[in-house]
Image (tube, rainbow, N blue to C red):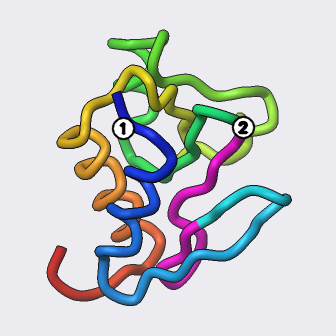
Amino acid sequence: MATEEDVRRACLALPGVTERSSWNQPAWFAKTLMARIWEDGILTVKTEEREALAGTDPQTYFWTPHHQRSPQLVLIRLERVGADELAELLEESYLLAGGRGPV
């Protein structure tokens, strides 16, 4: 079970990532937005596997009509992911958001 603090630690451990508010929620940026708390316990990240993730585990991975027009964005219920899975998702999101350097 991941927490917002786990997200913060993992994001800020990546080279060049900064944290600031986006829509009054904590958000992390590489070159562009890479992750944001959508609401309590829900994280938004970028992925090229949105359909596959939601198709295999829709209780964990989903999107709202708001995210429909952004096919790289997926919402994650943090209580349903472990630290290793969270780290993988954030590393992919970091690279898709223009992050550089060794991950």
- What residue sits right under mark 2 in the picture? 39
The C terminus - image quarter: bottom left
Front residue (pair 98, 14): 14
Residue 12 in the figure: left or right of residue 43: left
20 to the left or right of 96: right
Instruction: Pick whichever of labels 1 and 2 is earlier in the sequence.
Output: 2
Residue type, label 1: Glu
- Determine whether, in the image, residue 18 is placed left or right of residue 55: right
Q: Which mark is residue 49?
A: 1
At which x and y percent is residue 5? 46, 52
Q: CA distance from mark 1 to mark 2?
A: 22 Å
Determine the main secondary structure of the stretch shown in magenta. strand
Relative horizontal placement of residue 75, taking residue 85 as reference (left or right): right
**Residue 2 in picture, x, y percent from top left:** 37, 36
Count all numbered tags in the image, as a single digit: 2
Q: Secondary structure at mark 1?
A: loop
- Check disc 2 and give the amino acid type: Glu
Q: Is residue 34 above or below residue 58?
A: below
| SS type, badge 2 | strand
Highlighted magenta segment, given as a residue range? 28-39
Q: Position of residue 82 (x, y in %)?
A: 26, 32
Residue at point 39%, 47% (across, down)? 48
Q: Residues within 10 Å of mark 1 (few under 14, many from 20)?
A: some
